[in-house]
Image (cartoon, rainbow, N blue to C red):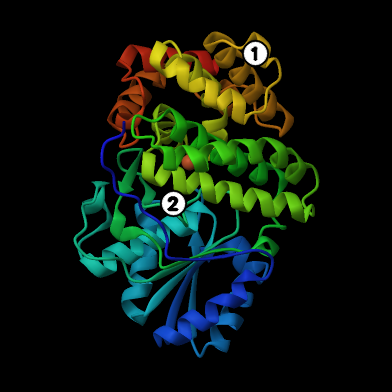
Amino acid sequence: MHNPCRVNMIATNFFGAGAIELIAEEIIKKGLKKALVITDSFLFESKVADQICTVLAGAGVHSFIYYGVKPNPTVEIVNEALSIAREIEPDFIVALGGGSAIDTSKAVGIVLANKGKVEDYEGVNKSSKKSLPVIAVNTTAGTGSEVTTFYVITDEKRHSKMVMVDTNSAVWIAVNDTNLMISMPKSLTAATGMDAMTHALEAVLSKEATPFTDKDALWAITVIKEYLPRAVKDPNDMQAREMMAYAQYSAGLAFSNSGLGMVHAMAHSLGGFYNLPHGVCNAVLLPHVMEFNAKDEKVQQNFQKIYKALELKGASAYSPYRAVTDSVREIKRLSQEVGIPPDLSELGVREEDFDSLAKLALQDTCMPSNPVQPSLDQIKAVYAKACKKH
Ligand SMILES: [Fe+2]
């Protein structure tokens, strides 16, 4: 039996090639006239932002563009976007990009509605008012930020990532237009795809998992395993792009309601400390944290679901132990196939930082939903394993 729980969903979603056109009708219905588009320099220079502004103009909206978003967005970036927003006073925000643009937009939307500064909202449900309306146009597959109540901002002063879990930050409309995902480079497709796989796996193993979150997470695992290698191999494989868009959304919906776990807690430390790509950190840590969690017998039972979702063969010799070892091996194989580095030392992670990294991970908002509560030394041991050359 499960405890009573709240289920968060996004009311309006548009999917598929050309889906961006569908936002115009919603904007007109709401009578909105002024937008701030928050994006990065690549999407600005490659004219994707102009494409969005054309759709907005068709709905009678006057747009301004902020294109200073960078990976692992910082408090400084949020403040820069905020100062522009305060000047132009938009009716709504259009987030254009992956998790970094969407997370920056959520932070701006929350601070505009609630005042104060972004640091005030670190933790769980710290705001009192709903964000300014945000349309999240997702161009990666993906962080799932367009569907979750989570956003992450790096505090450069503390070299750490602040995780905000806030139902007021849920976006107004989520758009997953596969035409906007074709230009993703292979490495970004691989990293964001493995991020989505981590969301799904952590959702299944989470202490807060429910049959509802399992349904979405397990489906996502099956689809990502099949379509991520195809999307990495051929960026123009539209079926793979579409299935990855749906799968990363499902994984996001799952973890938004189940929480994440130790992989994300440890990856947030790495991202805040060394400014490393989030998806790559998750992918390298994932098999090691799976092995750590599976030492607990109760958690081991849950690996049977993962084993089935990964469609691994040999069910006749099926056992909890086999489910763990085969699932871990399959995740390592998938990471290798899509070109993820095999260990953290290749990313420049240093042993002398393990203590600081582990302390940050222990305090991370994602850690409490991990099925096993690790000690500081156990976290350090997992960092050490993930650093070892394989
Ligand atoms: Fe993530």
Q: Which mark is residue 73?
A: 2
Give the class, few, some or many, for how many residues have Cα within 10 Å of label 2's Cα (few <14, many ≥20).
many
Question: Foreground: 197 or 186?
Answer: 197
Residue drawn at (51%, 18%) of the image: 288
Label at residue 358: none
* Residue 48 placement, left or right of 147: right
Q: Is residue 110 left or right of residue 187?
A: left
Q: Position of residue 2 (x, y in %)?
A: 31, 34
Residue drawn 66% across and 29% down? Answer: 335
What separation in Å lies between label 2 and label 1 (alpha carbons)? 31 Å
From the image, which quarter does the N terminus lie in? Answer: top left
Kindly tell me whether residue 282 is visible in this rendering. yes
At label 2, which amino acid type do we have? Pro
Closer to the eye: label 2 or 1 = 1
- Name the residue beneath numbered marker 1: 390
Q: Earlier in the sequence, mark 2 or mark 1?
A: 2
Quarter assignment of residue 183: bottom right
Q: Is residue 296 left or right of residue 117?
A: right
